[in-house]
Image (spheres, rainbow, N blue to C red):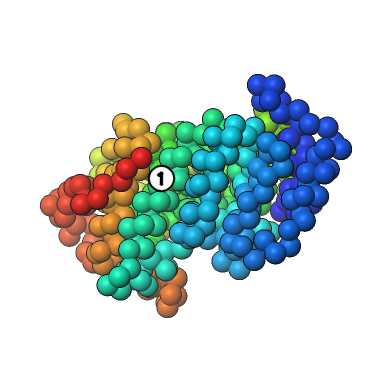
Amino acid sequence: MLGHAGKLCFFRSVAKVSFDGRCNITPKRMSTMMRHFSANPSSNQDEVILETEGNKCLITLNRPKALNALNLNMIRKITPALKQWENEEKVLIIIHGTGGKAFCAGGDVRSIIETRNQPTSTLSCDFFREEYQLNYLISTLQTPYIALIDGITMGGGVGLSVHGYYRVSSDKTLFAMPETAIGFVPEVGGTYFLPRLTGKLGLFLALTGYRLKGADVYHAGISTHAVNSQENSEIEGCLAKFTKAATFLEKPFSLEPHMPLINDCFSAASVEEIVAQLKASNDPFAQETLTTIRKMSPFALKITKRALDEGSEQTLAECLQMEYRLSQRFVADHDFPEGVRALLIDKDQKPQWKPSSLEECTPEKIQSYFEPVKDELQL
């Protein structure tokens, strides 16, 4: 993966690129800037490190032991910084993660579930509201925003990257939206960007939690550019140059042979019909996919299918508002806490879903998840 030195070289090179004539610094000044970025050892204890040099900015997600999982404290540091930098007309913002394994492996949902029944806790409301507001803010930035999605990028990490203008992946990137496995819905704007991927790829990724690795992240349209993980990477023409030189992209999209089947099966009108078509297929990939789907929360699958169908016709703001409603219903219900328990707390990998089958998911309960909540998300 891109080591610290590699990320600094990437920053040095990118900072030479001109954005509307506002950013043009010499290697000498860049060297001074990078010394400044490394000169505050006390900040290494912070979960988010915010650094600026002149009109350039760097965000470092700094929870390596937790794979840089996003929590409310981190959101509350990043959001005002982005607003301030936008107002100050900075010319460059880069976000990356420490530890060498992950950009950001998701949101800290374990804390949300563990505190949800505490009488004074508002974490389940505050976290999702402020996370989605941050996702929307990233989508509206005029300042060039570059996410280095090197390593694991899931859930909340997707929200920190996919809405920005530039997403740079490597051969070590691992992307997934695995929420249905914990009885939840692919959110952080997932109901907006997933339906806009090629064909029915987004719905396939949403329902199955399928993991895209290396070149697949770029071929699927998740990243805008790519670099070899071991190179000192040098936005526009600079990134294009290194994308062209990213030799791992010569590996074809692993899902390409399966796209006809994915488009056919996942074009069905309901999850039940998707399952039926997969079951009827003799293709080994269809059977593998069927096995995966059967492990997921049936209710989460039903909600996810409807949410992506609606999201395909909505704006990002409308999708995030829908997702906020869904998040509050999932937190208060059975499957999301049960999924977090089974996969993240007890780790017995044996969630007991309620309802236990797709057929038991009533239209009335599904509709109730999409109804307005008391305090709607404001963007």
Q: In front: 316, or 56?
A: 56
- Left or right: where does residue 349 sit relative to residue 376? right
Q: Residues within 10 Å of mark 1 (few under 14, many from 20)?
A: many
Going by the picture, which residue comes out furthest to the left? 364
Q: In front: 151, or 321?
A: 321
Q: Is residue 301 visible?
A: no
Residue drawn at the location 81% of the way across and 50% of the way down: 35
Looking at the picture, how far across and down is residue 94, in whole percent? 64, 43
> Badge 1 is on which residue?
133
Residue drawn at the location 28% of the way across and 38% of the way down: 310
- Left or right: where does residue 145 sit relative to residue 325? right
- Left or right: where does residue 30 sit relative to residue 317? right
Q: Is residue 342 visible?
A: yes
Q: In front: 263, or 283?
A: 263
- The image quarter containing residue 240 is top right
The residue tagged with tag 1: helix, strand or loop? helix
> Number of callouts in the render?
1
Looking at the picture, how far across and down is residue 11, in whole percent? 73, 42
Residue drawn at the location 51% of the way across and 47% of the way down: 80
**Location of the C terminus (image quadrant):** top left
Residue drawn at the location 82% of the way across and 38% of the way down: 29
Looking at the picture, how far across and down is residue 43, in whole percent? 67, 61
Looking at the picture, how far across and down is residue 63, in whole percent? 59, 63
Question: Is residue 71 shown above or below 248?
Answer: below
Q: Amino acid at mark 1?
A: Gln
Going by the picture, which residue comes out furthest to the top? 20
